[in-house]
Image (cartoon, rainbow, N blue to C red):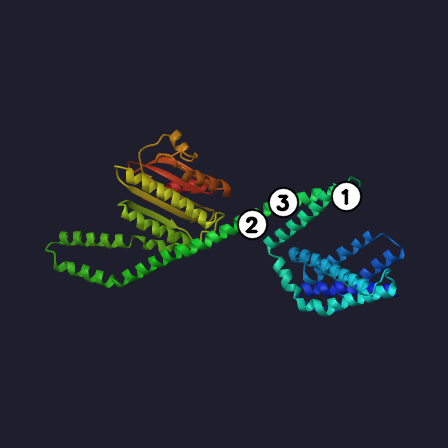
Amino acid sequence: MITNICLLLEALSIVFCLHNLYGDKVNLDIETVSYLSIHMIIMASINYYDLPQVYTLITYPFIIVYGGIRFGFKIKPLIINNILNIAITSSIQFIVLFSYCLIFRVQVLDSINALVVSGFAFLIVLFVIPKCRLDRFSSFLQDKDRIYIIALWISVIVAGYCLAKYKKLDSVGLFQNAILFVSLIFICVLVFQLGKSKVKAKEVETELKLQKLYADSFQNMIDNIRMRQHEFNNHISTMKGFCYLYNTYEELVHAQEDYYETIKGENHFNKLLKSGNPVIIGFLYGKFTEIEKHGIDLSFKIGIREFNISVPVHKIVEMLGTLIDNAVEALEKSNGEKKLFILMVEYEDGFVIEVRNTSRFFEPDELGLFFKKGYSQKGENRGLGLYNLKNICEEYGIYAACMCEQINSQNWITFRIFNNMDIATRRVVESEL
């Protein structure tokens, strides 16, 4: 009878601790009573038939199933809370047992002493554990990085324990070898996952920095457009006044066309506002204003929405920056016409990015060298930009191409990034200068 009471107190401790980990109160409903009954039957059978203690592991799957039925089968909280539950209840029982035996000098634990120990352990779970807010601790541990770190430490400790066992040849067995092997595998996998997680966290940090950096550029563009809108009435009045300044119709038309082209040039970048993704638009606006200062004839076609693709935004900005900077440097050294065309279009089935500038003709073999590491026409210690661009494309499963094209009797060198071969072909037809 006393043994059964001890088993019931142990089962209740497990239930109360699990509910505290989920931040929930215990209700003695059909699920809870069923679990308590199953736990009691299994433990009583083990004690009655004097089975090895290893058979107590049978109760653990039932704890997991009970937690899943009660709180849902979300894998991460289910695993973490059940591990914590077992660790906490076992630790409490051990601490109470050790303290009780030490204080009362108990050498052999009879039924009465076992009942006292189980009772004290249950009281701690019932009254002390709820004040510890275990649900917050559980939520804290459910962060992916913390899970990896904790699991890594556990694996290292287990592996170290198994390696220490090797110093005692008589204690090394198949079980220790298997545990060591599994621990080493876990260490390798967890280190790899932690590395991936760190890289992803760094990418997110870079994205946030880019958003902050180019948000100012985007806002400057909006402010400039608003300022020019206030000048619109002045421009209309000026053009109306032309009719009093010129004697012939031809002179009037010519003056109005010149004035129109001037206004159009000043508001050339207003079209950028039609596109989405402030980071990319802010970056392009900054680049375009720089290009204008170099006396380069710039034309562009930007048709993107949020640009939610498989490639992070900061990688897109990095590739765009490489292509634009290379084109500007090449045009500055050119003695011919300095024309630059930038295209960025998002389709339902993909995207295409294109940077094209007037250039001399390159043979196909020479074009193929552009993406080689260290190859550059700019001198030594250069030639890494396009090589890095190629690596980014390979990492995210997209394509980069380089070609020479004849457009309007001029030779252009074109760099194109895309994720769909059909789109790349379609782009050649749709491109506009």
Say which of 228 and 187 sits in front: 187
Query: Label 3 amino acid?
Result: Val
Mark 3 crowd level (few <14, some 14–19, many ≥20, 10 Å Cα)? some
Badge 1 element:
helix
Query: Label 2 amino acid?
Result: Ser
Q: Residue at x 46, y 53 (%)?
A: 207
Badge 3 element:
helix
**Mark 1 lies on residue:** 175
Query: Label 1 amino acid?
Result: Phe
Front label number (1 vs 3): 1
Disc 1 to disc 3, how far (Cα)? 21 Å
**Mark 3 lies on residue:** 189
Disc 3 to disc 2, how far (Cα)? 12 Å
Residue 48 percent across, percent down from the top left: 89, 57
Say which of 234 and 6 sits in front: 6
Q: Is residue 21 above or below residue 418?
A: below
Badge 2 element:
helix
Say which of 397 and 144 sits in front: 144
Q: Say if residue 36 shows up in the picture.
A: no
Quarter of the image for residue 325 reads top left
Q: Tell me the quadrant of the picture where the C terminus can be found.
A: top left
Question: Which is more N-terminal, label 2 or label 1?
Answer: 1
Front label number (1 vs 2): 1
Q: Residue at x 26, y 52 (%)?
A: 265
Question: Which is more N-terminal, label 3 or label 1?
Answer: 1
Q: Tell me the quadrant of the picture where the N terminus can be found.
A: bottom right
Q: Residue at x 70, y 56 (%)?
A: 83
Say whether marks 1 and 3 touch (CB < 8 Å).
no
Disc marking residue 197: 2
Say which of 241 and 330 sits in front: 330
Mark 2 crowd level (few <14, some 14–19, many ≥20, 10 Å Cα)? some
Residue 82 percent across, percent down from the top left: 71, 58
